Image (cartoon, grey):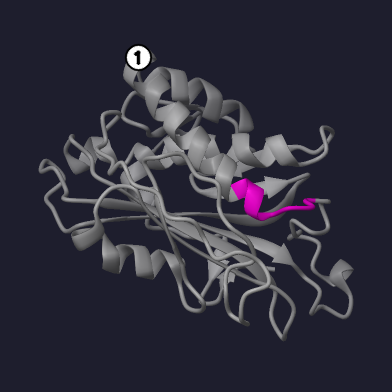
């Protein structure tokens, strides 16, 4: 998985000031990525749909604010693994380390960025979103044609009359993220960095960066399973349980 193929292309987002429904600003991404702005809909679903044709490096993103629902920053990236699915699933751990690094880089230094197993992310204990995983249909011992990592973050909760009535969640706006799109850009760069760490230092190097952020405690095995005192929690099962979201996205 650490040698996941990418396509050396870039494509900027739409600059601010464009028509309603356009991207809030241009993206600054490193060469492996091709950005696709999504005016509405699910970035995760769109990336899964584009994956067979567009391949590695395809990055779909969407941002909304205001209205009757929470504002969202969603993005999803396509990867092409070179290992069987049973091993390629560990890309979610790599992605979570990159997401944690990106959030920590842009929030005030005293904020705590932590994980709920395996794909939830919190800021100072408040759920801000999480990461989803999908793969092309393949036997666990076969190499899937593609995998997708999808990130969904609460950008704002301006629609709530009393945000304090929802103490389990938080938004990027409330946590003083002045440029939420910068989180996406940093994630793209950190994802490449952490795949490089995986290549040169092994999966243990990622596990050592992921485990300290786990709210539940525990450590990761070489297979990416969570090791707790009461027994292991397999990553293969955990990626299917999205306790941090409901049908509309991250739970408030």
User: x and y percent of residue 192 in the render?
Assistant: 43, 32
Q: Quadrant of the N terminus?
A: top left
Whether residue 148 is visible, yes or no, is: yes
213 and 81: which is toward the camera: 81
Where disc 1 sits, the SS reads: helix
Q: Relative to residue 120, is residue 87 drawn left or right?
A: left
Give the answer, above or below, for where 121 lies relative to 209.
below
Q: Quadrant of the C terminus?
A: bottom right
Please identify the residue farthest to the top as the structure is shown.
Answer: 201
Quickly name the residue at label 1: 200
| Quadrant position of residue 103 | top right
* Residue 180 lies within the magenta run: yes
Q: Relative to residue 172, is residue 199 drawn left or right?
A: left
Q: Relative to residue 219, is residue 10 drawn left or right?
A: left
Give the answer, above or below, for where 53 lies relative to 32.
below
What range of the chain is rendered magenta?
177-183
Give the answer, above or below, for where 150 lies relative to 248.
above
User: x and y percent of residue 77 in the render?
Assistant: 39, 52
Determine crowd level at label 1: few under 14, some 14-19, many 20+ residues with C-alpha closer than 10 A.
few
Whether residue 234 is visible, yes or no, is: no
204 and 168: which is toward the camera: 204
User: x and y percent of residue 240 in the render?
Assistant: 37, 57
For the image shown, how many numbered marks are present on the structure? 1
* Residue 42 lies within the magenta run: no
Please report the residue visible at 63 percent of the width from the left and 67 percent of the height from the top: 72
Please report the residue visible at 21 percent of the width from the left and 43 percent of the height from the top: 85
Q: Relative to residue 197, is residue 70 drawn left or right?
A: right
User: x and y percent of residue 49 in the render?
Assistant: 28, 69
| Quadrant position of residue 54 | bottom left
| Quadrant position of residue 16 | bottom right
């Amino acid at each position: 998985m650490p040698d996941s193929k990418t396509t050396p292309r870039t494509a900027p987002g739409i600059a601010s000031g464009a028509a309603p429904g356009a991207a809030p600003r241009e993206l600054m991404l490193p060469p492996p990525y091709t950005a696709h702005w999504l005016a509405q809909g699910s970035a995760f679903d769109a990336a899964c749909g584009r994956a067979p044709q567009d391949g590695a490096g395809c990055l779909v993103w969407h941002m909304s604010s205001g209205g009757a629902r929470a504002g969202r920053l969603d993005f999803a990236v396509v990867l092409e693994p070179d290992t069987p699915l049973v091993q390629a699933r560990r890309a979610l751990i790599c992605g979570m380390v990159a997401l944690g690094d990106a959030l920590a880089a842009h929030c005030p230094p005293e904020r705590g960025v932590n994980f709920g197993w395996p794909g939830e992310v919190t800021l100072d204990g408040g759920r801000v979103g999480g990461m989803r995983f999908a793969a092309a249909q393949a036997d666990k011992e076969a190499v899937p044609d593609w995998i997708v990592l999808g990130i969904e973050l609460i950008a704002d909760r301006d629609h709530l009359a009393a945000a304090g009535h929802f103490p389990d969640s938080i938004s990027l706006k409330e946590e003083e993220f002045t440029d939420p799109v910068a989180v996406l850009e940093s994630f793209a760069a950190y994802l490449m960095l952490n795949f490089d760490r995986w290549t040169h230092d092994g999966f243990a190097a990622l596990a050592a960066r992921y485990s300290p952020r786990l709210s539940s405690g525990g450590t990761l095995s070489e297979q990416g399973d969570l090791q707790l005192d009461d027994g292991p929690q397999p990553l293969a099962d955990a990626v299917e349980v999205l306790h941090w979201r409901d049908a509309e996205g991250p739970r408030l």
